[in-house]
Amino acid sequence: MGKKQGKQTKRKADVHDNGGDLDSGIFTSARPGASLFDTIAAPIKTSRYVQALLGLTIIGFLLRFYNLGGNSLWLDEASTLTFARQSLIGIWESTAGGEFNPPLFYWLEHGMLLFGESEFVLRFLPALFGVLTIPVVYFIGTEFRDRNVGLIAAALLAFSPFHIFYSQEARAYAPMLFFFSLALLFYVRASKSDDVRSWVLFGVFSAVAFWMHFYAIVPVAVLILYALVTHAGAIRSDPRSARNLALSVIAFVVASLPLLIVTVNLFMVRTSSAPTFGIQGFDVIYQTLLQISGFGDLILVLFVILFVIGVAYTWREDRNGALLLVFMMVLPLAASLVLSSRMPMIPRYLIYLLPVYFVGIAATYPALYALVRDRRAVYLVIAAALLISTPFLSTYYTTPQKNDWRGFSADLGGMTGEGDLVVVLPPYMAQPLDYYYSNATDGTLELGATTGEDLATIRGLHPGRQAFYVVTSDIFAVDPTGDAVGWLEENSEFAGQHTGIFLFRSA
């Protein structure tokens, strides 16, 4: 009796433990003749992982679509609208002619204009791709380690302030991350199985990510380099072992060949002189880690420590996996550090680090479980991920996160009168201004200026008109000498500022 009871107790303990599997002890079997609906619904009813992932995806949807049109369009989003209004061929010609963004996102936004030009419509696709990335990151973590790691990585992404912000921006960053995440998922699968299909899909989705944003080529190159390094011995002994990897490279090149040709020319132009905006030096690394961690120094320190622990714990059982995490974090940051002296570098270009960073952090969970031996701990980790992002979320939806051109334009319209001049510095800032302000309706004359000489010429041509000068800090990117600002200080008076948009008027 005692022995039998002891065996039962041990069996219960084994079922409860089982590596921390949330579905341990749940037994399901497919019913013969079950309908398609029942087949799909069965995992939702029985698997705690599917339930948790579905819950995270729904929460991620709410966080990314709530108040989607609340913030004004800022310069880059207004620029998206400008390009999206062109024809499909015109968009490609703009890229080939010097636009420093690939055409795919503009093509997609061109189609979205069928539904209007509101802030919500322009941001719909990034928000949708942002939501869809959550389950993809879950599968990356599951392939990399197990379903607990996948679930925690998905939670970190779902509540990520950085990802929420760029999922609500009408730019290509969130879409690029979605397709790169798919590429990374198939890369991890291919690394384990050497399956031709997975290698080819890695190449195809890498190409789509590249068509979304030029900087996607950096992590793709790192992944290929990693494969060559880790398989160097096998390739030397039998070059045919690199056949599937070569197929993925061929798939990437074939799918992105026209863009690759354009990229070389654009890269030469972009690096021909020192950048006049962006972040340079080691501040690139700090600001990138700060922002992808959640915009807080304490969170940055915590996440970096957890990432290092995750790499160390992974090293014990999967050295190649640990090396992949290190390669994918260190090399892109190092490349960005070097490139920052020759081209503008901004943390959002490195949004593709998120799945690697979060999987590395989530990889600490097996070590935590080894201490607590309670599979429910995964829910506490998910709750902690939400708690960490709470300070950001508490103000994000109620405080303007971008230049408030909507509010500024309303104020400007209340000051100007018929016949007044509205001078925009630099001239391309007219894109977000004109989305909300109509000089035709207001009866004003809108002009652009870059230098103090431009401003003096405008004043000479219209000596009797009241002038309002709309200025942002971008003026220093096109006029690093400060000549235009110096002219304004001498010949106009400061009339106020609105979320980083400054207004001067003629004295």
Image (cartoon, rainbow, N blue to C red):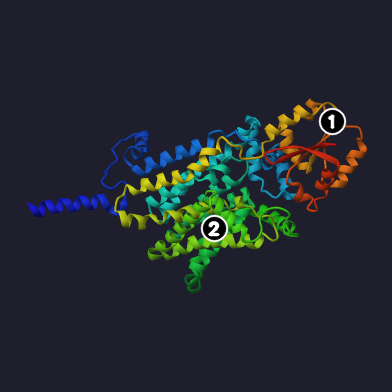
Number of the label disc, if any, that sits on residue 248: 2
Number of the label disc, if any, that sits on residue 420: 1
User: Farthest residue toward the bottom?
Assistant: 237
Asked if residue 12 is positioned above or below residue 411 in the image, the reply reads below
Quadrant where the C terminus lies? top right
**Residue 497, image quadrant:** top right
| Residue 487 visible from this viewpoint | yes
What residue sits 13% from the left and 53% below the top?
Answer: 6
Asked if residue 29 is positioned above or below residue 302 in the image, the reply reads above
Closest to the observer: 295 or 82?
A: 295
* Dot 2 amino acid type: Ser
Q: Residues within 10 Å of mark 2 (few under 14, many from 20)?
A: many
Badge 1 vs badge 2, beta-carbon distance below 8 Å: no
Q: Is residue 343 left or right of residue 426?
A: left
Q: Is residue 343 left or right of residue 396?
A: right
Q: Residues within 10 Å of mark 1 (few under 14, many from 20)?
A: many
* Dot 1 amino acid type: Asp
Residue 179, horizontal then vertical, whole percent: 54, 48
